[in-house]
Image (cartoon, rainbow, N blue to C red):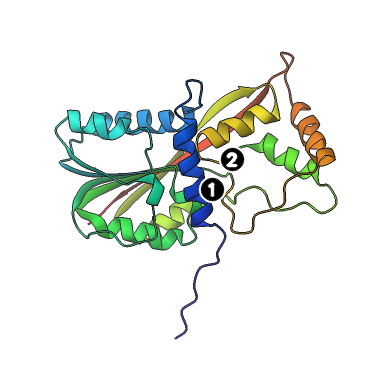
Amino acid sequence: METRSPPRIFSRQRRIAGLRRLLVRQSQRDAARYVMDDMVEDVLERLEFMRLAPKRVLVIGDWTGTLALSLRGNGAAVEETDVRSLDEEAPLPSGQFDLIVSLASLGRVNDLPGALLHLRAALAEDGILLASMIGAGSLANLRRAMIAAEPDRPSARMHPLVDNASASGLMQRALFRRQVVDSRSVEVAFSSLDRLVQDLRDQGLGSSLASAPPPLGKAALERAREAFLAGANDQGRVIETFEILTLTGWKD
């Protein structure tokens, strides 16, 4: 029986290059980091609520190092992946971890079902996966601006994103014994499209599509800027939403 490879939507090379640039940008004092900060805080709150004190933990994607530091302070042995060489689609050592946390990385893999299966295999019995990712309800104003920029023949510039129902189905396919998917919103005010793009680049959330579109021309960029600001409130700010999905799964 023929096995089909998943479609190549994302470029791992472009994603890693963006993450390397992130580490340089984060050396600047005013670099944005609110998406990762929110994800880290949420994970710590969930662990406290569940009264979970894991002994062996794998942390994937947290370029701030904050989560691992906190978990080590509570006595856990923590392994961290290097975001500069991260490959979520590669197999992991099996059965080693009581907890695996993946932050802002699973949303840009070509074989998401396969990546979830690898994560499940790496969990010990009764181990837990907590995976946070940018969800489909995100960046509606940016999407409208990109469509307005090229109304006749728009290029693919925005990532496809996973919604709540699809995430639940993926967790079931990955054979987690129990699974829960929930979402929350992080709202941020922007004075311009350029500031939003800067924040996305600061946080490694820029495009990593396999087919990189050409840069917007001057006229198209101006149309995008105008369309973005058309959604501004009476203070001249555009409220953009980042939907954060959190996938929680238990292994038998």
The secondary structure type at the circle numbered 1 is loop
Task: Tell me if residue 147 can be seen.
Answer: yes
Up-down: is 242 above or below 150?
Answer: above
Q: Horizontally, is 217 left or right of 96 in the view?
A: right
Residue 173 higher or lower than 239, as above or below: below
Q: Position of residue 130 (x, y in %)?
A: 34, 43
Seen in the picture, residue 242 relative to 250 is either above or below; the reply is: above
For the point 37% across and 57% down, the residue is 116
- Quarter of the picture holding the N terminus: bottom left
| Horizontal relation, residue 113 to residue 11: left or right | left
Is there CB contact under 8 Å for labels 2 and 1?
A: yes
In-front residue for pair 6/128: 6
- N-term mark: 2 or 1: 2
Marks 2 and 1, how far apart in space? 7 Å
Q: Is residue 176 visible?
A: no
Q: Secondary structure at mark 2?
A: loop
The residue singled out by tag 1 in the image is: 163
**Please, what is the three-letter code of the amino acid marked with disc 1?**
Asp
Q: Position of residue 141 (x, y in %)?
A: 69, 34
Q: Which residue is farthest top?
A: 235
Does 103 appear above or below 121? above
Q: Which residue is mark 2?
A: 137
Q: Position of residue 27 (x, y in %)?
A: 44, 27
Q: Quadrant of residue 99?
A: top left
- Look at 23% across and 59% down and name the residue there: 93
Dividing the picture into quadrants, the one containing residue 60 is top left
Left or right, 19 with respect to 207, comes to: left
Q: Residue at x 74, y 53 (%)?
A: 155
Amino acid type for the residue under numbered disc 2: Gly
At label 2, counting other C-alpha atoms closer than 10 Å, the crowd grade (few under 14, some 14-19, many 20 or more) is some
